[in-house]
Amino acid sequence: MKEVSLEDSITSGEHVVFRELAGEAVILNLETSIYFGLNEVGTRIWNLIHQHGSFRNVFQIMLKEYDVASEVIEGDLFQMVGELRAKGLVSVSRLQR
């Protein structure tokens, strides 16, 4: 599995559903029954991924919204996407330039 970078695009699988309740959410792969719970920040990241797709755009928006060092945000994003990817809930592809 290749490393994730800010130049990548993240998309959810076609058999993945997302449900949000009171600021938290659950992502479920209907084919594998694998699910993943998200806290409020994770839910925001998931929504940004669906709105923007570009990892760099998600990163830049998170920098504006949260008073946290860029290295922390980048590391948290990479960790979350890595976990989602390992569970087959998202796929990562290199953006075309």
Image (cartoon, rainbow, N blue to C red):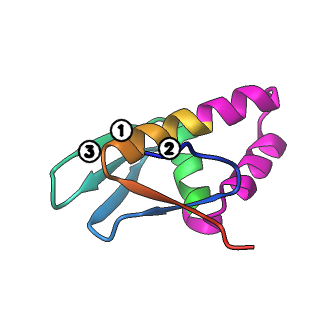
The dot on residue 35 is 3
Image position, residue 89 (x, y; %): 35, 53
Give the left or right position of residue 72, taking residue 86 as reference.
right
The dot on residue 37 is 1
Write down the region rendered in magenta.
50-76
Q: Which residue is mark 2?
A: 81
* Residue beneath the point at 58% across and 48% down: 45
- Residue 34 included in the magenta stretch of the image: no
Q: Secondary structure at mark 3?
A: strand
Q: Secondary structure at mark 1?
A: strand
Q: Callout 1, which amino acid?
A: Gly
Tag 1–tag 3 contact (CB < 8 Å): yes
Badge 2, how many Cα within 10 Å: few under 14, some, many 20+?
many
- Viewer-proximal residue among 23 and 86: 86
Q: In the rendered image, which quarter contains the C terminus?
A: bottom right
Q: Callout 2, which amino acid?
A: Val
Marks 1/3: CA–CA distance: 7 Å
